[in-house]
Image: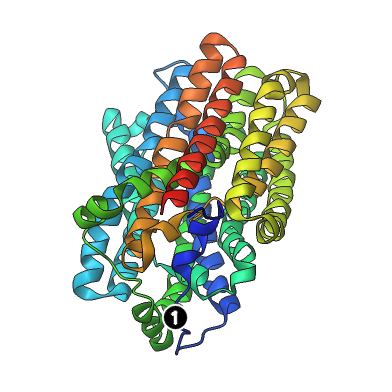
């Protein structure tokens, strides 16, 4: 019997009417706060990797090689993230969600503070690079452990006809985090001399990130450990399951879900982190001015994320992602040309890219997690996100910069196109499996 292509996005979401009614809007507030704080950390490190770390941790390399080395360290967090998810799932199973979240966010704060106080290569030599890699890995472990299940709770608790709308709310944390992080760096660039920025000014965004983590911890704990939330999550079976059991039962859906969102994750760093390195290396454009353009783009991204909720509720989340994969494939054809067209072209690349990112990223998280059913959804959604970040975004700045620097900007288009093709293929496989079920 055939099914609608979006059927897997909702069938498992049905169930007994909750006895513990919680307003979806209240859950959404917790999701946005949690994600915005995580993304601020994320972008502070990413921006520093493009603009600051090549000079202070890799001064013995030329600027291009130093940036590539900084991007290699940047990727470590995404490699470590799935291991953090598995480790902290075990902590939650034994001691509860409150202990898990407190431990994970304390670890994240410790790693962030460690980077803020870290001596540079000029003081410690190679040990500084080793410690930077260590703290970056700890950040990845902590981010894996910070999964609180609230996005899944929101998806299962939202009205059926508005699931696209509520799904996009948590994604707003990405542009919000970028706006604040880019704004801090733009202010520092505009206010300090380059010598002061490299000597001590770059540390301030990491101190801000530490403070935001403390506030976010209490905001998320207030929701995650409240009796009504715990009862609701128990009712919906949103609890850790053994990873081996998950992969034996639903392993293919982890990878289908990760590749289904690949067009969005591939674009994510191509419009945020990569352009900063490219502008610094191959353009005379002002860095604060370019950051302002990116901030404008992030506001457009936020608007596009909101629009994605309306679109998805009318045409379906899978069709929305599929349509955006096609749009990103088209963008990949002319993106290299406009990026090479001076300051106006660079601004157009960023603004168009952010709009496409918002429209696709708004529905990228959990688009096919209903395939896991209730039992495996909590752990399955977390690991699907981890794998999507790893294969789609972890090495994007490194690979894109290396390809473009050595073989030309045309390879940037090829990279984006590969993500769009992967998304189309994963959605087609998911649809075929849906028809068979």
Task: Name the image quarter holding residue 330.
Answer: top right
Image location (x, y in percent) of residue 241: 25, 64
Residue density around tag 1, few if under 14, some if 14–19, many if 20 or more, within 10 Å? some
Q: Which residue is mark 1?
A: 222
* 261 on left or right of 248: right
Query: Vertical placement of 185 versus 227: above or below?
Result: above
Question: Residue at 62% across / 61% down in the picture?
Answer: 164
Name the residue nearer the viewer: 217 or 26.
Answer: 26
Question: Residue at 49% across / 71% down in the picture?
Answer: 156
Image location (x, y in percent) of residue 362: 61, 53
Image location (x, y in percent) of residue 246: 26, 56
Instruction: Kindly tell me whether residue 428 is visible in this rendering.
Output: yes
* 71 on left or right of 99: right
* 31 on left or right of 112: right
Q: Secondary structure at mark 1?
A: helix
Question: Residue at 56% across / 62% down in the picture?
Answer: 170
Q: Quadrant of the C terminus?
A: bottom left
Name the residue nearer the viewer: 63 or 415.
Answer: 415
Task: Name the image quarter holding residue 119.
Answer: top left
* 411 on left or right of 326: left
Query: Vertical placement of 356 versus 26: above or below?
Result: above
Tally the marks: 1
Name, please, the residue furthest toward the top: 407
Query: Vertical placement of 162 versus 245: above or below?
Result: below
Name the residue nearer the viewer: 292 or 362.
Answer: 362
Image location (x, y in percent) of residue 24: 57, 77
What's the coloring here? rainbow
Instruction: Kindly tell me whether residue 200 is visible in this rendering.
Output: no
Name, please, the residue furthest toward the front: 1
């Amino acid at each position: 019997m055939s099914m609608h292509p979006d059927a897997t996005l909702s069938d498992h979401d049905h169930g007994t009417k909750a006895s513990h009614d919680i307003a979806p809007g209240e859950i959404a507030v917790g999701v946005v706060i949690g994600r915005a704080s995580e993304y601020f950390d994320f972008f502070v490190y990413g921006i520093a990797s493009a603009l600051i770390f090549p000079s202070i941790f890799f001064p013995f390399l030329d600027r291009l090689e130093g940036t590539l080395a900084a991007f290699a360290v940047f990727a470590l967090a995404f490699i470590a993230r799935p291991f953090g998810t598995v480790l902290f799932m075990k902590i939650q199973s034994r001691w509860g969600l409150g202990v898990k979240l407190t431990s994970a966010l304390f670890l994240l704060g410790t790693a962030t503070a460690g980077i803020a106080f870290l001596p540079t290569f000029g003081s410690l030599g190679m040990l500084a690079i080793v410690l930077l890699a260590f703290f970056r890995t700890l950040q990845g472990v902590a981010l894996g452990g910070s999964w609180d299940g609230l996005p899944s709770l929101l998806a299962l608790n939202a009205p059926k006809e508005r699931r696209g709308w509520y799904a996009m709310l948590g994604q707003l944390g990405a542009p919000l985090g970028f706006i604040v992080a880019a704004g801090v760096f733009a202010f520092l660039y505009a206010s300090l001399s380059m010598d002061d920025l490299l000597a001590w000014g770059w540390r301030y965004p990491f101190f801000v990130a530490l403070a935001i983590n403390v506030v976010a911890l209490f905001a998320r704990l207030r929701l995650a450990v409240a009796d009504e939330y715990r009862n609701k999550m128990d009712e919906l079976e949103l609890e850790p399951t053994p990873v081996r059991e998950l992969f034996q039962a639903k392993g293919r859906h982890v990878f289908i879900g990760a590749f289904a969102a690949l067009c969005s994750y591939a674009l994510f760093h191509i419009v945020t982190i990569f352009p900063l390195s490219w502008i610094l290396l191959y353009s005379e454009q002002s860095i604060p001015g370019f950051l302002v353009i990116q901030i404008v783009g992030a506001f457009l991204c936020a608007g596009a994320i909101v629009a994605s909720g309306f679109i998805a509720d009318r045409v379906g989340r899978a069709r929305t992602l599929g349509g955006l994969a096609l749009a990103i494939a088209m963008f990949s054809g002319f993106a290299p040309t406009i990026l090479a067209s001076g300051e106006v072209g660079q601004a157009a690349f960023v603004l168009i890219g952010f709009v496409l990112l918002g429209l696709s990223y708004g529905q990228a998280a959990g688009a096919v997690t209903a395939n896991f059913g209730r039992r495996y959804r909590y752990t399955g959604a977390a690991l699907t996100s981890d794998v999507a970040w790893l294969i789609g975004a972890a090495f994007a700045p490194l690979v894109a910069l290396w390809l473009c620097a050595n073989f030309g900007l045309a390879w940037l288009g090829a990279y984006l196109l590969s993500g769009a093709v992967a998304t189309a293929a994963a959605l087609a496989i998911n649809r075929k499996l849906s028809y068979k079920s």
